[in-house]
Amino acid sequence: MTIALIIIAVVLGLVVLLALFGILGFNKLRKADILCEEAMGGIDVQLTRRADLIPNLVNTVKGYASHEAGVLEAVTAARAGLQQAAQGDDVGAKAAAEAQMSGALGRLFAVAENYPQLQAAPNFMSLQTELAETENKLSFARQYYNDAVSRLNQLVKTLPWMFFAPMAGVRSRDFYQAPAGNTQAPTVQF
C-alpha cells in the first residue's frame, strides 16, 4: 500500500511539474508576442508623428515654392500612404510607405535648397529639427521591434518552447526591413 501511495505521489508531482512548465512556457511566449506588438506600436507612433509634421512642412514650403506643385502633391500622397500603412499590421507595407515618404521628403528638401529665405525661416528650421528627431526615434523604434522579433522567433523555433507556440497562439514574425533598393538613407542637404 505504501509503495502505491509513493508511486501516486511521484506521478502527481510530475503532472504538477509538467503543468507548471506548460504554464510558464505559455506565458513566456505570450509575453514575447506582446512585446513585439508593443514594439510595432512604437513604430506606428513615430510614423504617425512623422505624417503629422508633413502638412506643416508642405504649407511652409508652399508659401515660398508654390510652383512646385508636383513635389508637394507627391509628399501629400506619400503622407496618406504612410498614415494608411501605420494603421495596418503588414510590416512590409509599413516599410514601403516609409520608403516612399523618405523619397518624397528628399525631393521636397531638394526644392527647398533653391529658396535661401525658406531655409532661414524659423518655421522651416523648427520643422527640420522635429523631423530629424522623429527620424532618430523611428530608427530606434525599428531596431527595438527587430530585437523583440528576434527574441520571439528564437523562442518559437527552439526546444522546448516550439511545442507551446501553437497552444499560445504565437507564431514567428517578420523583421522590419527596408524595401529592396532602399537600404541607404536618402541624401538630403539643408
Image (cartoon, rainbow, N blue to C red):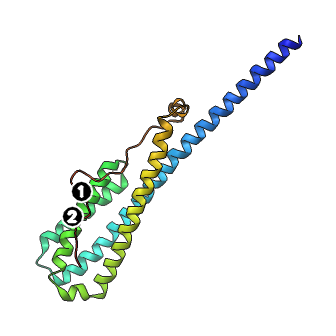
**Image quadrant containing the N terminus:** top right
Q: Which mark is residue 103?
A: 2
Residue type at the position of mark 2 = Gly
Whichever of callouts 1 and 2 sits on the residue coming sooner in the sequence is: 2
Vertical relation: 70 (above or below) 94: below
Residue type at the position of mark 1 = Asn
Residue 102 x, y percent position in the rendering:
25, 64
Residue 140 x, y percent position in the rendering:
42, 62
* Residue 158 placement, left or right of 63: right
Residue 167 x, y percent position in the rendering:
54, 31
Q: Which mark is residue 18?
A: none
Q: Mark 1 falls on what kind of element?
A: loop
Vertical relation: 45 (above or below) 90: below
Q: Which mark is residue 182?
A: 1
Gap in Å between the C-alphas at discs 1 and 2?
9 Å
Vertical relation: 2 (above or below) 43: above
Is residue 128 in sight in this rendering?
yes
Q: Mark 2 falls on what kind of element?
A: helix
